[in-house]
Image (cartoon, grey):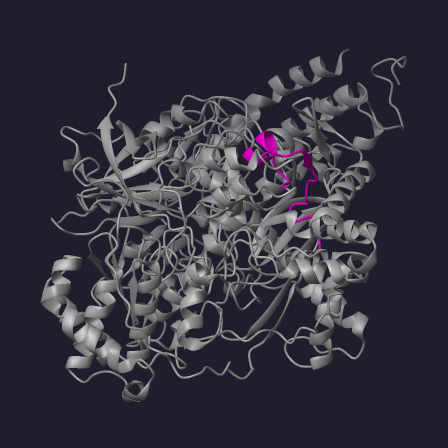
Amino acid sequence: MTDQPKDTPSSTPPPMGDDAATATRRDVLGAFGLAGAGMLAGGVIGHVVAGGLPERSGPATSVALKKPYVPGAEHFGSREEKWVATSCAQCTAGCGIRVRVVEGRAVRIDGNPANPINRGGIGPRGLAGLQALYDADRIPGPLVREGGNLVPIPWDRAIAMLVDKLGAARKEAPESLLVMSGRERGVVHDLWARFCQAFGTPNFVDGRPSRSSILAQATMATLGVFEVPTFDWSHAKSVLSLGAGLLEDSCQLVYLARSAADTRRGKFGERTRIVHAGPMFDLSANAADQWLRIHTGSSAPLALGIAHVLLRDKLADHSVETAPGFAAFAQMVSNGFSPAAVSEMTGLEPETIEELAHDLAERRPSFVYADERTFAFSNGWETALAVLSLNALLGAIGTLVHIQPQPPYAEWPATEVDEAARNAATKPRLDGAGTSAFELARAVHETLPDAITANPPHVLLLDYANPAYARKQPERWKQALAKVPFIVSFSPFRDESVETLAHLVLPDHTYLERWDDAAAAPSVGGAVAGIRRPVVAALFDTRSTGDVLVQVARALGGSIAKSFPWEDTRVALEARLRGLFEARRGSIIEAHERAFYDRMYAEGFWVDTDVPAVSLRPFVFRAEFTEAKWDGAEAEFPLKLIAYRPVGYAEGSGANLPWLRQLRVRPNSFRTTETVASIHPATVEGLENGDRLRVESPFGAIEVLARLDARMAKDTIAIPMGGGHEAFGRWAKGRGANVMRLLAPGPAAHTGANSLSTTRVRVKREVQS
Amino acid sequence: VNRRDALRSALASIASAVTSVVTRNAKAEHAAPPKNKRRWGMVIDLDRCTGCGACAIACQEENNVPMLSTGYENRGAQIEWMSQLWVEPETEGGLPELLPFPCQHCLDAPCVKACPVGATFKDDEGLTVQNWERCIGCRYCMVACPYSRRSFNWDEPKFEGNLIQLLNPDVATRPRGVVEKCTFCSHRITAVKEQAAVESRPIRDAEVQHLTACASVCPGQAITFGDLNDEHSKVSEQAKSSRGYRLLEDLGTQPSVIYLKRDRSG
């Protein structure tokens, strides 16, 4: 090509230079559109064409004229286009999505209208998924640490290295393997659990303590099921949201948004009344019919105060009177939670509490909604019990508050457990979950730094976990984890744990490149089984973590290999989906198994709305209450700190997805990459919007910008999570401040959850130079 | 003759011809479209809006709206087609209102009057459209727009790393030095028209109700799109609501975006 005269027409594709010229020309021609095309056909441009356009561009009137110029599109050939149904993974909701793929590029994510969870809607986190897929700073392939730096290593050697370390650890003590996963459920979560069981380590610590742990434990204690309940919005006439992250960080954002919208502008005269009682004006408060500002951390006394009025005025459901523990509960609320007493604790007028109770009782069916943001205070456990008890008094349990039925998945064959695994399984867990301190907990995060320092595991595997950033006092985690001799991260992104801790990095595909299921956080009434499938070919030399796990298990041999009879994640997934095929019910019924899977992969999900409700044992009341406690002396640290997940907090914090940084979800907000704290203007003399604040707790200090909000409580400051990354790609690194640096370390009492709002702080205005 | 030079001279010679065509069109369309034509409009029901911001992100994704490069994010030059506007209450103790905020596609559009080169004009279906390549970057339209719904490209659009791969091939990116704005996803309107033409039928209201990117993703289905001149369309039905209002109506701009105010009476 290079030695051809520049203007010679050529039948072979032109080199880049000509290509660019073609693009420019197309650009210019496109600009004039059809109006211009008429003139082009006339003589004016004739000699330009004769001047030597490459043949492939064809006559100037070709269809290419209508196509807009988009960088990169000059490489399109067929413009083959398809929509691929799959499931979102940007939070745990499991919304169904459709991805528009043009010539192998994912260019758009839309909600799947057929999916019962999101019914066509899709939240901001889900839309930003393309920026995770195409992030400029993804890890291109496996890395190994050599002389302090991470350098590329081929997959076979990387896996051999991991197998080696695991083999040695198992020989010595199988329980010396610690697996930390951010996942809460799903096929890869269960592959991890199975791997740990076959390996013989009790130390599988999943993602629950940072999200659903408290409510699942409280549901276990009161109803006998370890799961988060679902709330039936469509049949409720009145809903009280108790400080919930309802329309912000809820794992069911899209479902709740549609539910809230439908139940309020649905049929005439059937508007569901939503009251939000919380300490700050957030999106849930904005969307509610009424917002009641309550004292920070006072959801539990408010719930019990309402219970008091219901019982006093004989408005409670009669069936509860015979329930176990009811007498003690009734006594507790009637003695300590009169409207006058609760008014003191919550800051609401006694009449408002009476009104709330009467409204909930009279507009039945009604329920009280709460989620992890409600339980983020030191008394999260008691708050969850109070909320569930109040729902029992309203008669909502079993009518509006359900446990979502599971799809009829086929059981995997039992895990093969050899002698070594059997012995090791009896060893105590490193995190203390299940011990008397954390009786109902299945996993605990915040005990780990001390436990690891005292007794470091030999191998630590990090799956969707970034403790060097995302846990309280990340420096403390870094110091503890530095004692572990071999750490492997499966993160697709260069996060803090990859950069500072990992010895080996085996990057996972993103969720748009791999086979997986989308085990959704409970929301809709029916049984839903979503799947994820590759919508584009893997961009880099990455591998699905489930597949890597199967390979490692097979290489380890023995009973571990036997526990993994599947070639890869997809085969393991199908071994479960077989149950749905065999049930022959729900949205997909096929005569042949293969046809069933093909349809499931084409549609993206299976749903059965006509399933019997999960039967619940009678509600057990527990008369427990403590007030929210705060770390730090009030005299020295006058402000209560609420640390919360903002709307744009996707899994892994979402800080590397620039679209999510542009949301303006608070009044008086401004565009910045800094972390913005909400604070009452009277807190600091002369404070102005956008001023820089130094926030200090007994445990650390950060700098933020102030957003003045006269609706905030004067004793409270609210700081969103997700800022202050030291790594995690160009969009995240060095932007904002990490609120986790301020938080008091340690687990919540009883539940072992990562309570976010238990710390006091003080603020100082920084004078800008 | 170098091809590029030839192109350039050819362009120069036809530029004046095209200018006259475009400006003539623009002038003809200053007035409201006749009633027998379509008038594309949007109703945003704030009582269904939860403020999640999916509309704003969907818009950027669909229309290849560039992000500011790393390091330039705080300099106030962000390009916005659809964004979120907080309006503080007029009464003491009231609550603020959050509005999804696209171009209002005014019938009597101040930006169109301000444009000295006819780069932005009303099309015959009520859209305020803009020919990116005609824009000379004077930014008079930005000054004229009472809603600040126009943004200027201070720099070449940059799509770092693989982000270039997620560009929508149906929407041209805009070069440095031009003003850009919401188009009501006119490329999607074109696609619907073409489909209807292929099937020899009129456009159905059902296929445009959630046509724009912002409307199609909205979790609360707060946004409805359609023909305001079709009295049977969902959008014109909703526009009759007693909760309806338009932004800065007293300016006489006749916006095509109608907001239904949030009902906090319950």
Q: Position of residue B135 (x, y in %)?
A: 48, 26
The vertical placement of A184 against A699, above or below, is below
Q: Main secondary structure of the magenta part?
A: loop
Which quadrant would residue A692 be assigned to in this image? top left
Q: Position of residue A320 (x, y in %)?
A: 30, 85
Q: Is residue A366 left or right of residue B67?
A: left
Closer to the camera, A541 or B190?
A541
Q: Is residue B93 left or right of residue B241?
A: left
Closer to the camera, A87 or A406?
A406
Q: Position of residue A126 (x, y in %)?
A: 53, 50
Q: Taking the image as drawn, is residue B241 in sight?
A: yes
Q: Is residue A563 left or right of residue B143?
A: right
Which quadrant would residue A156 be assigned to in this image? top right
Residue A147 drawn in magenta? no
Residue at (38%, 53%) from the top-left corner?
A: A748
**From which residue to which does the magenta span run?**
A491-516
Residue at (87%, 18%) from the top-left corner?
A: A8
Q: How many marks?
A: 0
The vertical placement of A649 against A345, above or below, is above
Q: In which quadrant of the rendered image does the C terminus of chain A lie? A: top left
Residue A501 drawn in magenta? yes
Closer to the camera, A91 or A586?
A91
Residue at (62%, 61%) from the top-left corner?
A: A426
Closer to the camera, A175 or A654?
A175
Q: Position of residue A596 (x, y in %)?
A: 75, 72
Q: In which quadrant of the rendered image does the N terminus of chain A lie? A: top right
The vertical placement of A314 against A48, above or below, is below
Q: Taking the image as drawn, is residue B65 in sight?
A: no
Q: Is residue B75 left or right of residue A681?
A: right
